[in-house]
Image (cartoon, helix red, strand yellow):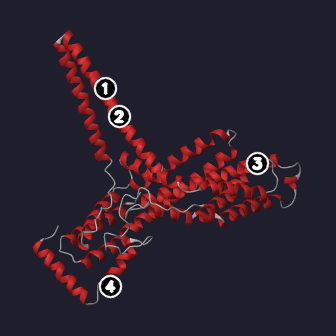
């Protein structure tokens, strides 16, 4: 439903833009005719000015495209393609992806050098008439030793960004005197955070790529039943936290906003790391399974980092003298922790699991290796490792090798 609405909005925007361009061109032509009737020389000068402006705009667009190269996309494959063709396509894609990562300014020079070396090694293997076993082994080695370590470095930076954003959003919502503006503030902060995460993983992505990633993140987050979790969390707070007036309402809203920010941040991280292909259904299922962990992170951030800064607000909302009683502050921290833990235990029942994938856009991870070998949740690394292990024995190996030699004899390297 959400994906359909977004596609409809994009189509309407394209139609509106086309209408505006047509009207603008008509106005330019009408002004040219007016100048020509006054004096042809004025019309010629006007036409040269318009051409100069259009050429400048075109050059600027080409400059932006060169400065912000598109993010490589995993190859689309069909069921008729042999495994060898699929793996060669994926290897060529890995070359583009490694070169793309090597231009990321958030990675160190040593890591960028390793990425370029990995791309060069793939090109050498592709030019040496590789067999299926060689390609499978190459994919496994490249993903495990080159791609994943680079993504691990970026994950550490992205996790720190998500943690910082969650803390700021929780503090802002808890202390906000204008609750009507909280939704706008949280939405803006989440979009800004997602944009920073995209730039962290991809350096300077093209505007179209940034929009595509943000669209996938927003569609995925919108389908997660975070509202049900927030309601349950608020009800648990009312029963677990001591009476501190309306402050508990602000705490509940802050925890809910922090949870939504954490979900958005981790969804953006997952989308940016999906070099094997994006599957919206699997991502929503994964977010649902990790919801308890997100709640635990939000609880730790709130009780350790924010609660000490809220003592003045809580003291003003509590009954006179209650804050000076022994164990009062421990009961507040314990109550918030208990409420979050109770909600986390019910997260599986409150988060609706997806039924139909929306906007997957690419093949399942690993289908470039073998037709139908990958089930939901399996990674390309595991599939490749299994193929490398089974390809080394049996009479099938001889037949496959002979067939590949014939392929190179008649078709040649591609």
Mark 4 / mark 2, whichever is N-terminal? 2
Secondary-structure class at tag 3: helix
Quadrant where the C terminus sits is bottom left
Q: Quadrant of residue 365?
A: bottom left
Q: Residue 255 in the image: x percent, y percent?
A: 66, 54
What's the distance in space between the residues labelled 4 and 2, CA to CA?
A: 55 Å
Question: According to the image, label 4 marks what residue?
Answer: 390
Mark 1 / mark 3, whichever is N-terminal? 1
Residue 24: give its label: 1
**Disc 4 + disc 1, Cβ < 8 Å:** no
Q: Residue 122 in the image: x percent, y percent?
A: 26, 69
What's the distance in space between the residues labelled 2 and 3, CA to CA?
A: 48 Å
Residue placed most toward the observer, 60 or 28 = 28
User: In the rendered view, does 306 fall on the left or right side of 102?
Assistant: right
Secondary-structure class at tag 1: helix
Mark 4 / mark 3, whichever is N-terminal? 3
**Disc 2 + disc 1, Cβ < 8 Å:** no
Mark 2 / mark 3, whichever is N-terminal? 2
Residue placed most toward the observer, 53 or 179 = 179
Question: Would you call the spot at circle 2 few (<14 residues within 10 Å), some (14-19), or many (20 or more)?
Answer: few
**Disc 4 + disc 3, Cβ < 8 Å:** no
* 146 in relation to 301, above or below: below
Question: According to the image, label 2 marks what residue?
Answer: 17
Question: According to the image, label 3 marks what residue?
Answer: 247
Residue placed most toward the observer, 147 or 83 = 83
What residue is rendered at 76% in x and 61% in y? 335
Foreground label between 4 and 3: 4
Mark 2 / mark 1, whichever is N-terminal? 2
């Amino acid at each position: 439903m959400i994906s359909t609405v977004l596609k409809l909005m994009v189509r309407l925007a394209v139609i509106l833009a086309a209408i505006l361009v047509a009207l603008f061109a008509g106005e330019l032509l009408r002004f040219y005719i007016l100048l020509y009737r006054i004096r042809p020389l004025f019309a010629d000068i006007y036409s040269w000015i318009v051409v100069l402006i259009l050429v400048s705009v075109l050059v600027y667009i080409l400059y932006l495209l060169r400065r912000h190269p598109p993010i490589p996309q995993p190859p689309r494959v069909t069921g008729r393609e042999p495994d060898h063709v699929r793996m060669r396509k994926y290897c060529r894609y890995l070359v583009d992806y490694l070169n793309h990562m090597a231009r990321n300014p958030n990675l160190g020079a040593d890591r960028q050098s390793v990425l370029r070396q990995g791309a060069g090694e793939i090109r050498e293997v592709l030019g040496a008439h590789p067999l299926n076993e060689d390609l499978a082994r190459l994919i496994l080695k490249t993903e495990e030793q080159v791609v994943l370590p680079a993504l691990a470095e970026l994950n550490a930076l992205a996790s720190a960004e998500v943690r910082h954003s969650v803390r700021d959003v929780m503090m802002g919502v808890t202390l906000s005197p204008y609750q009507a503006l909280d939704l706008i503030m949280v939405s803006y902060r989440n979009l800004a955070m997602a944009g920073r995460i995209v730039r962290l993983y991809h350096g300077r992505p093209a505007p179209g790529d940034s929009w595509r990633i943000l669209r996938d993140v927003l569609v995925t987050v919108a389908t997660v039943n975070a509202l049900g979790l927030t309601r349950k969390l608020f009800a648990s707070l009312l029963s677990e936290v001591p009476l501190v007036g309306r402050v508990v309402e602000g705490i509940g809203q802050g925890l809910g906003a922090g949870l939504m920010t954490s979900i958005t941040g981790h969804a953006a991280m997952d989308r940016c790391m999906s070099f094997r292909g994006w599957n919206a259904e699997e991502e929503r299922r994964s977010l649902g399974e990790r919801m308890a962990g997100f709640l635990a992170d939000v609880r730790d951030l709130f009780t350790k980092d924010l609660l000490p800064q809220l003592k003045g607000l809580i003291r003003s909302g509590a009954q006179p003298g209650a804050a000076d009683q022994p164990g009062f502050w421990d009961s507040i921290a314990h109550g918030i922790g208990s409420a979050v833990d109770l909600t986390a235990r019910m997260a599986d029942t409150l988060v609706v699991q997806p039924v139909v994938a929306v906007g997957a856009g690419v093949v399942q991870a690993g289908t470039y290796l073998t037709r139908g070998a990958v089930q939901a949740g399996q990674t390309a690394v595991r599939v490749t490792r299994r193929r490398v292990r089974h390809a080394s024995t049996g009479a099938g190996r001889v037949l496959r090798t002979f067939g590949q030699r014939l392929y190179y004899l008649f078709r040649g390297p591609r």
